[in-house]
Image (spheres, helix red, strand yellow):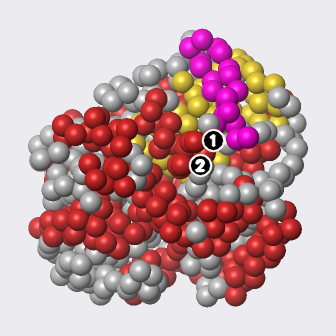
Amino acid sequence: MRRLLRVNLSSSVITKEDIPRKVAEAYVGGRGFCAKYLYDEVRPGIDPLGPENKLLLVTGPLAGTSAQAFSKWIAAAKSPLTDTFSRSSGGGDFGAWLKWAGFELIIIEGRAAQPVYIYITDGKYEIRDAAYIWGKTTSETQRLLKKEHGTKARVVCVGPAAEKLVRYAPIISGRRAAGRGGMGTVMASKNLKAIVIESDRNESLADPVEFSKLVRQQVKAMKAGLGYGVFKDYGTVQGLDYFYPVFGSIPMKNYRFAELEGWAEKIGMWPYSQITEKHTGCYSCALKCGKVRKISSGLYAGVSTEGPQFEAAWVFSGPTGCTDLDATLIANHLCCELGLDVISTGNSIGFAYELFEKGILTTKDTDGLVLNYGDPEPMLKLVEKIARREGIGDILAEGVKRAASHIGRGAEQYAMHVKGLEMPGYDPRARKAMGMNWALSNMGANHNYGWPQQEIGDPKPRLLDPVADEGQGDVIKYNHDSTAALEFGIACIFPSHHLQFYGLELMGKMLAAALGVPKLGSEDYLMYVGEKIYNLERCFNIREGFSRKDDTLPKRMFTEPLRGGVRDGEMIRKPDTIIDEYYDARGWDRNGIPTKETLGRLGLEEIEGDIAGFRR
Ligand code: SF4
């Protein structure tokens, strides 16, 4: 029997519930449970930062087993940044510990009257006073909680930025973040500082012999995989050396350029490898993509810190035109300590730099900071100002969409976001399936929501030309559905999708052996459930008023050619054609609403009444 823990912080009542067999069969686990419970339990129109929002923390059926890179966890809620369905996955050990404690899902509802944390151990569940850790950084919070509960405890927590309700605060575990969409902000809005789990390793598998055989197969596939050694040695920053020269897709100076003088020599896998001290990773993952590095200058000189990963390395250099390696380490460190999503933080700062260049912001607006391209000092100050909501930081803490509307004076055209979520380190004009993946995604600009590996050489279902103006719609759908399916597992997206060491087929066999449900061994069945989940998330958004009008990119992508790099001159030329292709492949109408037949085919007929009125 699979279980969830429901914690009502308003009433202080904690209940243990069985996940109904019907739900477990229909949604498998992980992100499937997020979609089902959020759709059923979060009413449309509620304030994401009010007590009616619910925060879900979920792990997958394979967490805590010997399977490689399957112990991730997901946080899901209605996002305070986008007002859409949102999910963000985190690493470290917490997923394994949650599973060993006997749960795949925690549902947190209501709001505590005072700061609290939740403590779970040996069948006991308590809500405890968190006054002594409120206001502390994420590392200090974890240190204090481990001091109290011992080294066998694992923690997820929020930092000071979440407590200030910065709209893009993550939930942190160890040095890993469930970063996107403000899941940490939702947690802090409930006055919940942390969740602590103490548990011992245990494993319950329907067919342990078959499962062990499949894990050996998985390890063999990883070791034989193209790029295994490079990824293990250099981590995700190795992508910088590939996407900058080969794809011309690394955005510079707020998505205007694809080149920056001196950047490739100073920000790349080789410079980072020179200062890497240690490799670290999530529970049961030989890849250990986390890299511990030492800061060599400034206030934090001598501090060893994990990171930056690809996105942080880019977002704390390209958007501000900086080529200072140390500044990327410091900014990433501050984000982890204070609890800020690196992509949204760096983008908000890059947005401010461009507004300063255009004269829309002056030193009167920036508390005296001069935001000159190439100078990392104001960038580091802005990270702290955002976390404290101080001066200009208070405006940038709202995210670029809300900040632009607050600033006015034409600032909207420089706000680079999709549905309110700041964009990752790929220029949509240089990788069009990537860009349209964001435009069509349920949570806005998230690269890992349907990463188009077909632009890089994966022939399944077919190869894509990264700069083709049309013809990607069905493949974007495939990526959205297959990612939703991988997130039942919960599979880490790197080995299973980006690097293609193994995929859904092997994950399905592992799920079948672990849960004793043979039909999970069918890739077609997993894709079917992935499609169902994707549609349910879409329907969550439809009830909130989202439709075709929101499936778009910033105007700059359609009107300004990309400048520099191998994709110089590229633009998104036929967005509506790709959107129509996608809707047709999905069985949605021209407003992006699933038809009655589509809902019936996916077993979602019970929600027909909720969305029928939005069709056209
Ligand atoms: S590849 Fe990296 S993020 Fe993925 S499970 Fe392994 S260590 Fe964690």
Marks 2 & 1, CB-CB < 8 Å contact:
yes
Q: Which residue is mark 1?
A: 21
Q: Is residue 563 visible?
A: no
- Label 1 neighbourhood size at 10 Å, few (<14), some (14-19), many (20+)? few
Q: Is residue 256 left or right of residue 12?
A: left
Q: Is residue 139 left or right of residue 38?
A: right
Mark 1 belongs to which amino acid? Arg
Residue 567 x/y as whole percent: 26, 84
Q: Nearer the viewer, residue 9 or 173?
A: 9
Q: Is residue 349 magenta?
A: no
The stretch in magenta equals 1-19
Disc 1 secondary structure class: helix
Q: Is residue 9 magenta?
A: yes
Mark on residue 25?
Answer: 2
Residue located 56% across and 42% down the image: 23
Residue 326 x/y as whole percent: 56, 64
Residue 486 occupies quadrant: bottom right
Q: Nearer the viewer, residue 130 or 257?
A: 130
Residue 436 occupies quadrant: bottom left
